[in-house]
Image (cartoon, grey):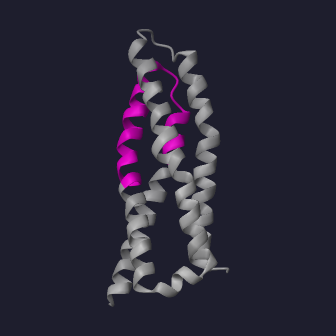
Amino acid sequence: MTFYGFVLLLHIIAAVAGLGASFAMPLVMKYPKTLEQAKFSLLLNKQIEKPVKFGSIGLLVTGLILGFINMDLFQHGWYIASIIIYILVQPIVAGILPKKLKQMEQILDENEGVDIPDDYEVLNHGLRPYNWIIHVAAIVLIVLMTVKPF
């Protein structure tokens, strides 16, 4: 196996680990019916977030290494578009979602009842558009890197 092939393999593993796990996160947050279930969902979400972060960073690093090994990639629209899409979703992934999840955690910590507070539900419902953006972007990235249409 060449060094390029090895980095490509790491890139694919990062995609499976990072992007794959990210699709579970909204499902975990969707089904809690009690305060304790919501707390557990947030805890589980934090654990799922770890491979997502490592995979995401791994994707960027290995993708750029592949580009520097094969500078011709910087001439392809699919490669440049992939980098741009990745950068565009980072404010959501690294900024908006963690902030909202922290707010949700605070709301649950301040509540002593058994029911999920309305404020939590509002924030949780507000995550859906961001999750759609992230997942559509992930699918587009996978299609671009697989099909290499332009």
Side of 12 relative to 148 (left or right): left
- Tell me residue 125's x, y (percent): 62, 31
Which residue is outermost to the top? 113
In the rendered image, the vertical position of residue 10 relative to residue 70, given as above or below: above
- Tell me residue 8's x, y (percent): 41, 79
Q: Residue at x 44, y 9 (%)?
A: 113
Q: Quadrant of the C terminus?
A: bottom right
Q: Residue at x 59, y 53 (%)?
A: 135
What span is in magenta? 24-53
The quarter holding residue 2 reads bottom left
104 is within the stretch colored magenta: no
Side of 81 relative to 102 (left or right): right
- Tell me residue 115's x, y (percent): 50, 14
Instruction: Note whether residue 18 is visible.
Output: yes
Which residue is outermost to the bottom? 2
In the rendered image, the vertical position of residue 78 relative to residue 17, given as above or below: below
52 is within the stretch colored magenta: yes
- Tell me residue 37's x, y (percent): 44, 26
The quarter holding residue 39 reads top left
Q: What secondary structure do most residues of the magenta stretch adopt?
A: helix
Q: Quadrant of the N terminus?
A: bottom left
Side of 55 relative to 126 (left or right): left
Instruction: Note whether residue 38 is visible.
Output: no
Q: Residue at x 36, y 73 (%)?
A: 10
Q: Residue at x 41, y 53 (%)?
A: 52
In the rendered image, the vertical position of residue 113 relative to residue 36, given as above or below: above
